Amino acid sequence: MVNYGGIGAEYDNESTAQIVVLPVPYDGTSTWIKGADNGPKAILDASANMELYDIETNTEVYKCGIYTASPVLDGNSPDEMVESVYKSSKKYLDEDKFIVTLGGEHSVSVGVIKAHAEKYPELTVLQLDAHSDMRQEYEGSIYNHACAMARASEYCDVVQVGIRSMAVEEKPYIKSENIFHADYIYREPYWMDDVLDRVSENVYITIDLDVFDPSIMSSTGTPEPGGLYWNETLELMRRLAARRNIVGFDVVELCPSEYNKAPDFLAAKLIYKILSFKFKELEITHCNQ
């Protein structure tokens, strides 16, 4: 795999980089369109074609150092994969790195969320997703991708945004005050303020790319109509970075297509924009000198 952003060795240095990109090419439990295990490579390949200057923030966040770690390949079962991701995440968090995890299916988020919940008190997971992922068990596994937020909620509070599909058996586990369905978002002009009111100071973001409308993100395993769009998603990330402490995030469920590379680039660019929002002040004062 190429390194994120195609940046040179000066900034892709494990010891000095402030940011670690952790690829997890796992797709063991997906239930419809397979291919999420190819997502990390597709994101990294697309990222090499980005401009590394961000116009909006007037920064070059890669100068804070972005190290692309070796992929987490351990784990024939979802249980083993979750444990391997947890151990890798804990290692980098102990080194005070900021971790960006690349999936893979959504179950890869469980281990990294567990590690962050142990490090950061009163953590909230902000889930951007078409599906609630609150099944307690699915197809014989509690670590199925359909159970990702059920497991995350065992470690910390979860606020869900963009949800427009769920099973009836998930309803008892949903906190009504913490879920922002897609239809509510389109009716309520101040929904972003409501979301920010529900999250704590420390926030971990998990982004299932099917949160986006299929018109701009067709390369997912379970696309759902009626999703979010690029500018409103960036506005939420912009406000979150300004008002809360983003401690890490993941981007999952990209099933790349040989014939349409735009979704791959969207995912790669989304990562760089969130990093630019997160590290804006630090990059201006320290990293860019």
Image (tube, rainbow, N blue to C red):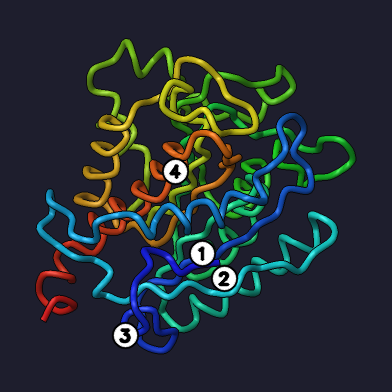
Disc on res. 10: 3
Instruction: Tell me the crowding category of disc 2: few under 14, some 14 to 19, or many 20 or more residues within 10 angstroms, Cα based.
Output: many
Instruction: Measuring from the top left, give residue 234's x and y in whole percent.
Output: 27, 39
The residues bearing labels 3 and 2 have C-alpha atoms spaced at a distance of: 23 Å
The mark lying in front, picked from 3 and 1, is 3
Looking at the rendered structure, the secondary structure element under dot 4 is: strand
Which amino acid, by three-letter code, is at mark 4?
Leu
Q: Which residue is identified by label 4?
A: 126
Instruction: Measuring from the top left, give residue 260's x and y in whole percent.
Output: 49, 34
Could you tell me if the residues under marks 3 and 2 are in contact, i.e. CB atoms within 8 Å? no
Foreground pick, 25 / 47: 47
* Disc with the residue nearer the chain's start (2 vs 4): 2
The residues bearing labels 4 and 1 have C-alpha atoms spaced at a distance of: 13 Å
Looking at the rendered structure, the secondary structure element under dot 1 is: helix
Q: In the rendered image, is residue 199 in sight? A: yes
Instruction: Tell me the crowding category of disc 1: few under 14, some 14 to 19, or many 20 or more residues within 10 angstroms, Cα based.
Output: many
Which amino acid, by three-letter code, is at mark 1?
His
* Disc with the residue nearer the chain's start (3 vs 1): 3
At x 14% / y 79%, what residue is drawn?
286
* Above or below for 86 versus 55: below
The residues bearing labels 4 and 3 have C-alpha atoms spaced at a distance of: 33 Å
Could you tell me if the residues under marks 1 and 2 are in contact, i.e. CB atoms within 8 Å? yes
The mark lying in front, picked from 3 and 2, is 3
Q: Which residue is identified by label 1?
A: 116
Foreground pick, 44 / 169: 44
Instruction: Tell me the crowding category of disc 4: few under 14, some 14 to 19, or many 20 or more residues within 10 angstroms, Cα based.
Output: many
Which amino acid, by three-letter code, is at mark 3?
Glu
* Disc with the residue nearer the chain's start (4 vs 1): 1
